[in-house]
Image: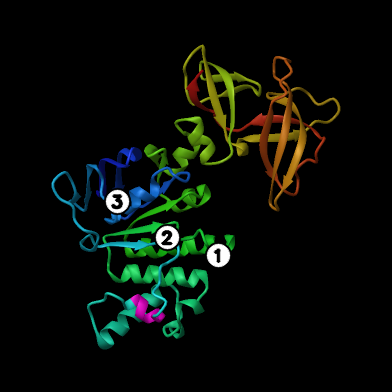
């Protein structure tokens, strides 16, 4: 069952198209992430779902109720949609308890109990109830904003880059906390971000936007492994893209002969591998030739448990000089130093992107 349905939404500002024919289904109880570069239309789409903006054309429905179509528009305050902006937008003149309880219909001890319950649900200690927003850390402010949004028992939760102002370690822990809380509450969630790693880790459905269009959607692993085009491949992470000749399920390229996920015959195409699909082995004297190609490590970017290496291919399986540089991920402890002669082989299938 789908909680949210977007049908052919379009929006222009003057002569500039912000959204063009966007359609998307969001399953009930899921976490959907809308990701794209700045200016791709993702925030406009989120604000349209919230009711802060209205489309020029198209239809939007939530749990079977039409919110927007060609004849009427349900205003934001009647949609029962929770919204957490990037900065939390807490009321500075209200305490934590007052912020969380803002808008609750209950009063007295019943309201206090509800606020205490919400604070506990987002891992806020009860002694923070009388603190002011400026006395809280960034992560605590975001949890207060989330508790305030959950207080309204929303049918849908919208998160507009809520972790972007947090440091790296806190961002990861907050992302896990929020994902767990929303899953336990059974609330359908949409997150907007430009952070690819955040999108891939938070989502169970990923929607990629570019120039106001929805270019691809699906499970994060599927989009990471099988992007529709080069731009999407590079946006979702580092990628090795090269020309190849496809024949009977194999690609003949600078890396030699490697299996692909497409069985087109005798066609020139672009193929993609992720850096983690490349393996390096040191070349020792009298090493027998194996499938793959030789290369030299030209750069070594150490980052602790992993190391990103730049290698320059020396020759393809046919013996032709290549000169192509590739990125390869290796264990940080055992990565070969710059200048090392190595053998490059592949794991799994290359993805065929497009014909040349």
Q: Earlier in the sequence, mark 1 or mark 3?
A: 3
Distance from Cα at disc 1 to Cα at disc 2: 14 Å
Identify the residue at horizontal 50%, vertical 33% (top origin): 231
Q: Residue furthest bottom?
A: 109
Quarter where residue 29 is shown: bottom left
Up-down: is 230 above or below 104? above
Rendered view: 194 above or below 110: above
Determine contact: label 3, label 2, CB under 8 Å: no
How many numbered markers are drawn?
3
Q: Is residue 155 left or right of residue 140?
A: left
Q: Is 329 located above or below residue 182 in the figure?
A: above
Estimate the x, y position of residue 260 in percent, counting from the top left: 53, 25
The disc placed on residue 356 is: none
- For mark 1, give the secondary structure: helix
Q: Which span is picked out in magenta?
A: 94-100
- Farthest residue to the top: give it: 266
**Is residue 208 or residue 63 the one in the foreground?**
208
Q: First in sequence, mark 3 or 2: give its number.
A: 3
Residue 179's disc number: 2
Which residue is under mark 1?
Answer: 170
Q: Inspect this view and state whether residue 95 appears.
A: yes
User: At 51% from the left edge and 69% from the top edge, which residue is drawn?
Assistant: 138
Overall secondary structure of the magenta stretch?
helix
Horizontal and vertical percent for residue 195?
51, 50
Numbered circle sitting on residue 48: 3
Q: Residues within 10 Å of mark 1 (few under 14, many from 20)?
A: some
- Residue 329 position by quadrant: top right
Element at label 2 = helix
Taking 138 as reference, is 329 left or right?
A: right
Is 316 in front, or is 71?
71
């Amino acid at each position: 069952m789908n909680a949210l349905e977007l049908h052919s939404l379009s929006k222009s500002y003057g002569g500039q198209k912000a959204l063009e024919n966007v359609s998307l289904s969001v399953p009930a109880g899921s976490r959907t992430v809308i990701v794209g570069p700045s200016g791709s239309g993702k925030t406009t789409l989120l604000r349209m779902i919230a009711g802060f903006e209205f489309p020029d054309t198209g239809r939007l429905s939530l749990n079977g109720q039409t919110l927007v179509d060609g004849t009427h528009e349900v205003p934001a305050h009647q949609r029962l949609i929770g919204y957490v902006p990037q900065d939390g937008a807490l009321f500075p003149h209200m305490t934590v308890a007052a912020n969380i309880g803002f808008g609750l219909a209950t009063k007295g001890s019943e309201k206090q109990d509800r606020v205490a319950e919400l604070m506990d649900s987002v891992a806020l200690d009860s002694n923070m109830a009388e603190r002011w927003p400026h006395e809280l850390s960034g992560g605590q402010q975001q949890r207060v904003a989330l508790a305030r949004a959950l207080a309204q028992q929303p049918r849908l939760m919208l998160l507009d880059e809520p972790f972007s102002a947090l440091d790296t370690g806190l961002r990861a822990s907050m992302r896990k906390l929020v994902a767990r809380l929303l899953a336990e509450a059974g609330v359908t969630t949409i997150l907007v971000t430009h952070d690819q790693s955040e999108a891939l880790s938070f989502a169970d459905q990923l929607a990629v936007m570019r120039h106001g269009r929805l270019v691809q959607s699906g499970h994060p692993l599927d989009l990471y492994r099988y992007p529709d085009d080069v731009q999407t491949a590079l946006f979702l992470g580092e990628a090795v893209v090269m020309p190849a000749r496809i024949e009977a399920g194999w690609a003949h390229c600078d890396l030699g002969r490697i299996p692909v996920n497409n069985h087109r015959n005798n066609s020139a195409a672009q193929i993609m591998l992720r850096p983690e699909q490349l393996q390096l082995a040191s070349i020792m004297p009298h090493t027998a030739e194996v499938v793959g190609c030789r290369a030299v490590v030209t750069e070594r970017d150490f980052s602790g448990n992993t190391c990103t290496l730049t290698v320059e291919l020396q020759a393809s399986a046919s013996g032709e000089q290549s000169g192509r540089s590739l990125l390869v991920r290796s264990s940080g402890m055992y990565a070969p130093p710059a200048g090392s002669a190595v053998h490059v082989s592949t794991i799994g299938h290359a993805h065929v992107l497009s014909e040349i």
